[in-house]
Amino acid sequence: MTKTYNFCAGPAMIPEPVMQKAQAELINWNGLGTSVMEVSHRDKPFLALAKQAEEDLRELMNIPENYHVFFMHGGGRAQFAAVVNNFLGEQGKALYLVSGQWSHLAAVEAKNLVAEEQIETLDISNYQDKESTKSVTLPDFSNDKRDFRYLHYCPNETVDGIEIFDDIECPWPVIADMSSNILSREIDVSKFAVIYAGAQKNIGPSGLSIAIVRDDMLQLPSLPQPTIFHYKAQLETNSMYNTPPTFAWYLAAEVFKWLKDIGGVSYIEKHNKEKAALLYDVIDNSDDFYNDVALNNRSLMNVTFHMHDTNSEAKFLADAESEGLVALKGHRFVGGLRASIYNAMSKEGVKELVRFIEKY
Ligand SMILES: *Cc1c(COP(=O)(O)O)cnc(C)c1O
């Protein structure tokens, strides 16, 4: 059987050594004679796992002391609502930068939850012009006197293949949806008030979300909301207000250990840049394929591309699949092709895809 390389955007592949370890200890975790799925989250073995997971994530991302780390339910979209409900109250306003599909959807959710005038959006993309190279322009907020509780943006637009590498300089706390690029490259956590991510791209299985919240943000007035999404409740209960997604948490913990073992975020960043360069190179040098994202906004994690002859894309997908290169279809909103090459994707997998495109 040919080896399968999975380029799915999410749920995405999980590192093979982690999956093998999980398989080996599935029915006997920690010598307990049961699986990690079948033990109380309030007993010592799981509490130790939870503590280690937080310590490892703090070390990997260099998270300062004045930030809390919450392991929560509901993936990325639960956090779309959580930030609104935790920080805006009845009066507060927020600014949402829109650079692609996910930042747009975050703004839509925010508008669903509070009064219209509380949410302002600013389109920083050039999507209106379908012909142009996709890019993002960061506004200059240095003399902006408006009063926002936070600015929200999405540094990696999973659907569009657009990444924002520069930090946003602004007078307001910055909240970032890093669902698809957390742990992919080094970032300075202290530039952010809140970082959140659904787990299923770069951390583990779906359902879990991670929120990294600066302590002072918890002073902001929150709206009535389900307690499971209340950050203060998460803080008071060590992310165990209710039964957490324990198996997802366990796998996340194993992914953190794996990443530490192979050299941490600085190592994986170098590796990710090499992988992305291989793929963009072969696309740029091809007569049949192209990528329409500006050079300095090309995502390291989600490489979107198209065929000049769009009618050939279905055959390309089928041919790729027959060679073990799966899940290369672009998002249903935007079409085309997409290779998601998160941390778990090996350079070998990318090289296989490069070889396939080269000879296509
Ligand atoms: C996948 C993704 C989401 C949505 O995550 P869910 O867990 O499905 O809610 C949100 N934001 C970004 C950037 C994503 O890539």
Image (tube, grey):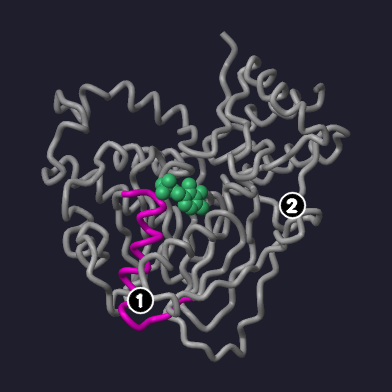
Most distant residue in the right direction: 287
Residue found at x 38% / y 76%: 115
125 vs 108, nearest the viewer: 108
Residue found at x 49% / y 39%: 10
Whether residue 124 sits left or right of residue 28 in the image: it is: right
| Residue 319 in the image, given as x and y percentages of width and height | 69, 18
Q: Which residues are magenta?
A: 74-94
Question: In this orientation, does residue 150 appear?
Answer: no
**Residue 64 vertical placement versus 307 (above, below):** below
Magenta region includes residue 347: no
Q: Which residue is mark 1?
A: 88
| SS under mark 1 | loop
**Residue 199 vertical placement versus 359 (above, below):** below
| Residue 309 in the image, given as x and y percentages of width and height | 82, 32
| SS under mark 2 | loop
| Quadrant showing the N terminus | top right
Per the rendering, the mark at residue 293 is: 2
Residue found at x 30% / y 57%: 70
Q: Main secondary structure of the magenta part?
A: helix
Whether residue 37 sits left or right of residue 279 in the image: it is: left
